[in-house]
Amino acid sequence: MTEQAQTLYRKWRSQTFSDLVGQEAVIQTLRQAVAQQRLTHAYLFCGPRGTGKTSTARLLAKMVNCTNPHDGEPCNECLSCIEITEGRSTDVFEIDAASNRGIDEIRDLRERVRIMSATGSTRLYIVDECHMLTPEAFNALLKTLEEPPPHVIFVLATTEAHKVPATVVSRCQHFEFRRIALRDIISRLAFVCEQEGMRVEPAALEALARAAAGGMRDALSLLDQARAFGGDSITTAGVHAMLGMADPALVREIVTFVQAGDTARGLHRLNDFAQSGVDLRQLASQIAEIWRQLMLARAGADLVALLDIAPEDAAALKALSASFALETLTECARIFARNDAGARVQVVPQLALELAFLDCVAVRQGTYPSHAPENAARPSAAPPAAPPAGAVAPVAPPPAPARPHEPVPITSAPSARAQATPPAPIPAPATPGGELPSTNGHQPAPHLNGHQPAAPEPPSATPTLTPVAAPTPAIHEAVATDYGAGVNATFSRIVQEWEMIKKICKQSSHSIAALLAAAQPIAATEGEPITVIISVEHAFHLEKLSQPTNRQRVVWSIQQGVDVLCQVKFVPQSEAGNYAALTPATPAAPLAPTPDFTPPAPSSTPPTSTSPRPPADAVATSPRPPAALTPDDPPTEAHAAPPRPAAPPDAPPTPDHRAPAAPQPQHDALVQALQRDYRATITGVRRPHA
């Protein structure tokens, strides 16, 4: 049977204060306290993993029990030091708070601390990961922690100090352990390699130290793994292969492809990385780190001191950053910094990287939505296509008279979605068959409730109302997505796109989309980013949606649907009324005039009638709906006008009686109702009204 070898991080654990790397302030304080006999009864060691918290606690136990200390250091030769080093001392108790977190374990601890050591030495109780204790256990420990027996010292160690109650922190001396510097880790690794007889390339040591992220235990564990991978001769290529890292020189080429706008070569290079087995999350971290380095170089930071890199590497980074604007580097770094959240839910592994790369190219070229140049010209609307042969040319409506006391709507710049899809041409007017010509391959929109409009009548001397052409989906997208800035406008967009957001969420998780079926956004609060309040009907759905992973998927779906950074808060439906006043109800954005669609102006001259009046029980054929109809109400049968009775074939042409004598607000309401009905027919999705 093969004998198990001792790992490097256990074999080379610090046995003296001088071996403890990177914690000079803590070492000096404890040395002075031991020399002056000013040790306290409780200590709290906080810091990242692998920075020496438990090792320092053991060194403190050695110092207080060593029979022959030298210059503030334990001798490591007496019986007490040897027992502590070998982990068999009866005066040092290490308690794992993750598995002994209840009040019963703390009661047992309170009974044990009263027992003195047989040798009369000081006993040390090391409670590792103390933040895992329950609130009841913390409360039971307070009195013992505040006034322990004189022969007992408590050392609480944790990686999450914010979870430790303030009542516990106030009873301890608090020491912060910081991450170990890169050069200190490299020096320690080189020393261990020299003692172990290993040959390691300097670049390989640097790669191991950077991967350790400031933890000495992680660095020694990675060195042990690299030794098992390549033997006593460790190379840089072997370390990169072991860590799943890409060649830094090839990764830096991604930035040069962004600089040149060469999307094809950049996408091929990302595919090569994926095919070669590179860890894509590690690759995303490498690219994000390069953007960070370039951003710091462009901002004028001292890279040698800040990043701990060689001067020649700093010079190369400064030369490359000179070809970018600081705003471009900042946006590219931000894109890759938030790339990991979307990568977790992608079906294709490298899709998140490819999208982030294309976004960086768009930022470089000034076409990214949030990074467009200020002096960029607003795209003009595409000219309408020529009508097909044989089609009736649309009649230009006369200029509409100005309405008193009515503000003129202002049309803002087209949104990104509107720029991506050029406006479709205006369909020709209704044909005698009562149908609209097909637009962009779509079927014509039916009239409200399935009724066909009346056949157009021959032109006469009396002015008639020009038929209104149904809007195209492109017109709707250009108008509906351009609300302007502000929390209310953003919330209105989320409400209007809620059905689409649920469909996007369904692509990544059917279960979360099912949970959202009984959820509805009810308000939004200001902040960076804004917080969207979502009401959930059932308690079980609320519990599932509140889980961090599911919450992140909902946030990602909202960002994909409306392109807005936000966070979400789920509340039960019973508390929805508490948030009703946060965001005022904002009606849907009015349809602004566009180059592709202009509502016809009513005639100022009332038409004359030469046909006999219809019977008294006949339904009026005016297109105006009842007064209760508003622009946001869906058309119903009560508001729809029945078809006009057909005239005899030999009857004389009858002038149009439907033109209003004065501007009517109900006319605009019907136009918008027709637009919604046509949009639902074309897209297949009936968007919720604000």
Image (cartoon, grey):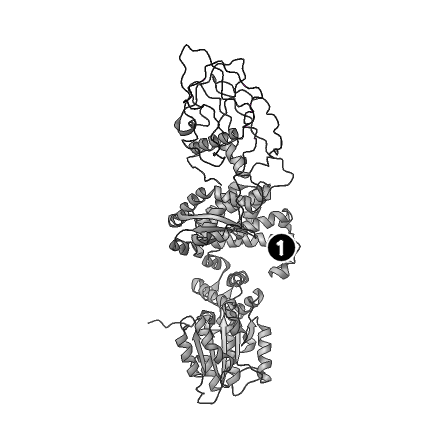
- Give the residue at the far bottom of this rendering: 119
Disc 1 marks a residue whose amino acid type is: Leu
Instruction: Give residue 178's quadrant in the image.
Output: bottom right
Quadrant in the picture for the N terminus: bottom left
Nearest the camera: 299 or 392? 392
Nearest the camera: 403 or 613? 613
Rendering coords of residue 663 (x, y %): 56, 27
Rendering coords of residue 221 (x, y %): 46, 67
| Residue, disc 1 | 296
Q: Is residue 115 left or right of residue 465?
A: left
Q: Residue at x 39, y 76 (%)?
A: 104
Rendering coords of residue 233 (x, y %): 48, 64
Determine whether 142 is above or below 405 in the image. below
Nearest the camera: 30 or 653? 653
Nearest the camera: 270 or 51? 51
Residue 136 visible, this angle: yes
Numbered range of the magenta stretch: 591-619
Mark 1 element type: helix
Q: Residue at x 54, y 45 (%)?
A: 490
Q: Is residue 610 magenta?
A: yes
Determine whether 337 is above or below 403 in the image. below
Determine whether 11 is above or below 319 in the image. below
Q: Is residue 423 magenta?
A: no
Residue 309 visible, this angle: no
Determine whether 600 is above or below 358 in the image. above
Name the main secondary structure of what is drawn in magenta. Answer: loop
- Give the residue at the far front of this rendering: 616
- Give the residue at the far left of this rendering: 1
Q: How many marks?
A: 1
